[in-house]
Image (tube, helix red, strand yellow):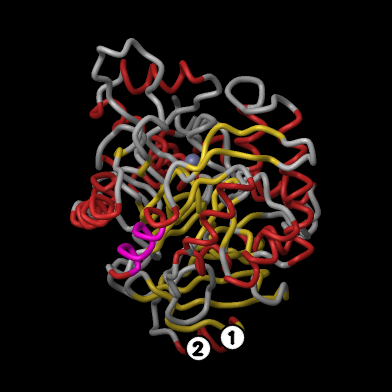
């Protein structure tokens, strides 16, 4: 094996080739997918300056407008689309099919160790083409997610743009670690808070420590009623839930509700949460309310399947209940964003598999791609993400196959660019991190 190309390849993978740190660069796209319309445009160009796209259009026009000697990233044999966005992750978790897996991570792994693993998870995600992620709770690792975000932004470690929740919230006696001897004072996977005023103060404190999102566990204890509906116990009174939402919104932050049963979804919609996570128990009536309110939904299909045998409620029947809700929600036009809940399953599995599951449950490949680009960017409220128009971050992925024909092709990306920096230009096998 020729050592020099191998070394160059490795450096390219680890450091990222600075395409456009300072000077402008051009990207030539053989096929460029306009994710809003589904149109595949032929021979397109993107001009990239200081990490952003400053012009896009037919290659002839864009390349003519570029200064002489501009570096070209030639993707003329590939399909190019915006970098993927994962809207429900846990970088600080490494899979917990059984509740003991969760307890082991909290009790046996230090926060520094978990953070090192999180850095590896973030790197893997970026290599898979996820250039942005919303991470919904550090699960007992304090604000390590805020630190990881900071380290990525500073270029200390590679990873997606992170939007983090810090510690998620739940009420006393509702979230692991639970059911240990009563005299033990054990750590919790959440920030425990009760009562309207305490909630307001806690939300302010989370934001002070760097949380971009306020995540609340709204329900637990799932059962199936005689009418087939999923029922649950809510963790908070309505006025407490409203306090989370009001205070977060007052501070300019959005809110995410973990909900599974009818009662939780009803409570979260009444309180006005911006996004619902899981929401397996969605009914026609609740879906109508979500559509009317413009609430986003991350269905977390794969995580539901993955944990079904272990800690999932109702066993293997549960993923089928979610699949039925998904089909109904899709028909009603609820805003569905890609959110796999990776971290509930290990970071050795590419969360792009969630897109294939969405297509199996009725989405078109374009709708699945939209869920991971425009819709997820909308959920985040970041207009520079999810598209490749002028003003967008130069975050893109490219692949030799047409993802509109086969959505699983997104699990076989060839090129990843974040902020104009080429993160990867080789097939995944060469780039997969060793674990
Ligand atoms: Zn989650």
Position of 354 with respect to 51 (left or right) is: right
Q: So how many labels did they put on this image?
A: 2
Is 247 within the magenta? yes
Q: Work out how far the residue at label 1 is from the one at label 2, CA to CA, in angstroms.
A: 6 Å
Determine the residue positioned at 59% across, 45% down: 278
Task: Please tell me whether residue 344 is drawn above or below residue 64 in the rendered image.
Answer: above
The image shows residue 413 at horizontal and vertical percentages of 60, 49
The image shows residue 140 at horizontal and vertical percentages of 31, 32
Q: Quadrant of residue 370?
A: bottom right
Task: Please tell me whether residue 365 is drawn above or below residue 249 in the rendered image.
Answer: above
Q: Which residue is mark 1?
A: 60
Most foreground residue, 131 or 58? 131
Q: What residue span does the magenta drawing correspond to? A: 242-249
Which element carries disc 1, helix, strand or loop? helix
Q: Residues within 10 Å of mark 2 (few under 14, many from 20)?
A: few
Q: What main secondary structure does the magenta stretch of the protein show?
A: helix
Determine the residue positioned at 47% across, 84% down: 55
Question: Does the numbered disc 1 mark a residue whose Cβ is under 8 Å from ligand 1?
Answer: no
Task: Please tell me whether residue 204 is drawn above or below residue 59 in the rendered image.
Answer: above
Q: Are marks 1 and 2 in contact (CB under 8 Å)?
A: yes
Q: Which residue is mark 2?
A: 64
């Amino acid at each position: 094996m020729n050592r020099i190309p191998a070394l160059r390849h490795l450096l390219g993978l680890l450091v990222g080739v600075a395409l456009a740190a300072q000077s402008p660069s051009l990207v030539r796209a053989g096929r460029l997918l306009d994710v809003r319309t589904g149109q595949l445009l032929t021979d397109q160009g993107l001009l990239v300056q200081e990490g952003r796209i400053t012009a896009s259009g037919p290659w002839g026009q864009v390349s003519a407008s570029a200064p002489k000697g501009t570096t070209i990233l030639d993707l003329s044999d590939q399909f190019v689309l915006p970098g993927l966005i994962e809207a429900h992750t846990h970088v600080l978790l490494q899979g917990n099919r059984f509740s003991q897996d969760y307890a082991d991570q909290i009790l046996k792994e230090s926060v520094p160790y978990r953070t090192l693993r999180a850095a590896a998870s973030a790197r893997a995600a970026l290599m898979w083409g996820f250039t942005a992620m919303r991470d919904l709770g550090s699960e007992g690792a304090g604000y390590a997610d805020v630190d990881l975000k900071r380290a990525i932004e500073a270029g200390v470690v590679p990873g997606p743009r992170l939007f983090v929740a810090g510690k998620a919230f739940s009420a006393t006696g509702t979230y692991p670690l639970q059911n240990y001897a009563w005299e033990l004072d054990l750590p919790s996977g959440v920030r425990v808070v009760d009562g309207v005023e305490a909630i307001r103060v806690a939300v302010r404190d989370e934001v002070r420590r760097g949380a971009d999102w306020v995540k609340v566990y709204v329900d637990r204890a799932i059962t199936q009623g005689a009418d087939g509906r999923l029922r649950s116990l809510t963790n908070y009174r309505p006025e407490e839930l409203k306090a989370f939402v009001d205070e977060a919104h007052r501070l300019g932050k959005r809110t995410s509700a973990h909900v599974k049963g009818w009662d939780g979804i009803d409570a979260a919609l009444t309180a006005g949460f911006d996004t619902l996570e899981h929401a397996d128990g969605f009914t026609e009536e609740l879906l109508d309310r979500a559509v009317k309110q413009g609430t986003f939904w991350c269905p977390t299909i794969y995580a539901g399947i993955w944990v079904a045998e272990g800690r999932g409620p109702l066993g293997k029947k549960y993923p089928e209940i979610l699949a039925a809700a998904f089909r109904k929600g899709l028909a009603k036009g609820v805003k569905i964003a890609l959110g796999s809940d990776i971290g509930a399953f290990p970071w050795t599995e590419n969360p792009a598999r969630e897109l294939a599951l969405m297509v199996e449950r009725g989405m078109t490949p374009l709708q699945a791609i939209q869920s991971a680009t425009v819709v997820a960017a909308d959920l985040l409220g970041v207009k520079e993400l999810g598209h490749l128009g002028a003003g967008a971050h130069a975050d893109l992925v490219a692949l030799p196959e047409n993802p509109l024909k086969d959505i699983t092709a997104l699990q076989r990306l060839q090129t990843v660019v974040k902020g104009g920096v080429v993160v990867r230009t080789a097939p995944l096998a060469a780039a997969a991190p060793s674990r």
